[in-house]
Amino acid sequence: MSASPTTNQGRATRERIVRAAAELIAERGATGTSLDDVRAATAASKSQLYHYFGDKRGLVEAVVGHQCAGVLGFQARALAAVSDWESLERWAELMVTGVEQRGGRGGCPIGTLTAALADTDDGLRISLNEAFRAWGDAIRGALARLRDNRLITAEADLDRLTTIMLAAIEGGLLLAKASRDPEPLRTALDGAITQFRANAPPRRRQPSA
C-alpha cells in the first residue's frame, strides 16, 4: 500500500521519482521499464519506491497522473487564449513549434500511454479517457468563444468539431514522431481548422450601389 508524503522533502522526493519514471517510460514503454531501472535513475531505495507507490502499477499510475496534468495544464492555458481565427492559428503554430524543438520526438504523452496501457489496465484506460475528455472540454471552450464571436454558426456541432481536432492532434503527433518531421502535424491541424472555418456564417452580400 502506498503512502502520501507528509513533508516537503518527501513530496520533492516523490516528484523526482515520478519525473524520472515518466522519462524512462516515454523512452522504453511501461513494460520495458522496471522498478530497478527507476531506482538506478533516481538513486531511490526499494523501500522508498514501495512506500510512495506500493508497486510498479502504483508508479505507472502516478506517471499517468503526472503526464496528464502537464499536458492538460499547458493546453488549458493555450486554448484559453483562443477567441478568433488568428489566435486559433497561433495555438496551432505553438503546437508545431513544440514538435520542431523536440526534433519530432516524443509524440503526445497521453496518446502514447493510452496506446500502451488501454488494453491491459482498465482503470488507467479510464483515467486516460478522462484526460482526453478534459482536453476536449478546453477545445470546446475555444469553439464556444468562436461561436459567441459569430465566427462559426450557432448550429455548429461543437462535439463533432472537438473530436475532429483531437483526432488531428493525435494523428498528426504520431506521424510527426514516426517521420521526425513536424509537417504532418501542421497538415493535420490545418485540416481541422479548415473544418472549423467551414462552419463560419455565410457572408452577407454588400448592398449594390
Image (cartoon, rainbow, N blue to C red):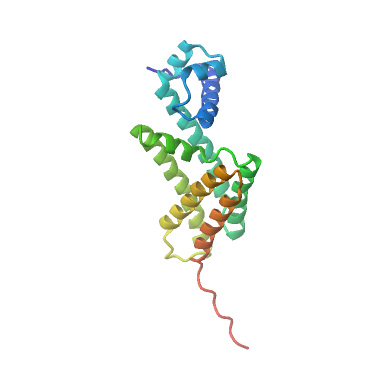
In the image as oriented, which residue stretches furthest toward the right? 101
In the image as oriented, which residue stretches furthest toward the front? 179
Q: Position of residue 134 (x, y in %)?
A: 44, 43
Res 6 visible = no
In this view of the protein, which residue sits in the foreground, 9 or 173? Answer: 173
> In the figure, 31 relative to 126: above or below?
above
Q: Quadrant of residue 62?
A: top left
**Image point (58%, 60%), residue name:** 85
Q: Position of residue 109 (x, y in %)?
A: 51, 37
> In the figure, 9 relative to 78: above or below?
above
Quadrant assignment for the N terminus: top left
> In the figure, 60 relative to 95: above or below?
above
Q: Position of residue 102 (x, y in %)?
A: 63, 39
Res 155 visible = yes
**Image point (45%, 57%), residue name:** 161
Quadrant assignment for the C terminus: bottom right
In this view of the protein, which residue sits in the foreground, 13 or 177? Answer: 177
**Image point (50%, 66%), residue name:** 198
**Image point (56%, 37%), residue name:** 106
Q: Position of residue 18 (x, y in %)?
A: 51, 24
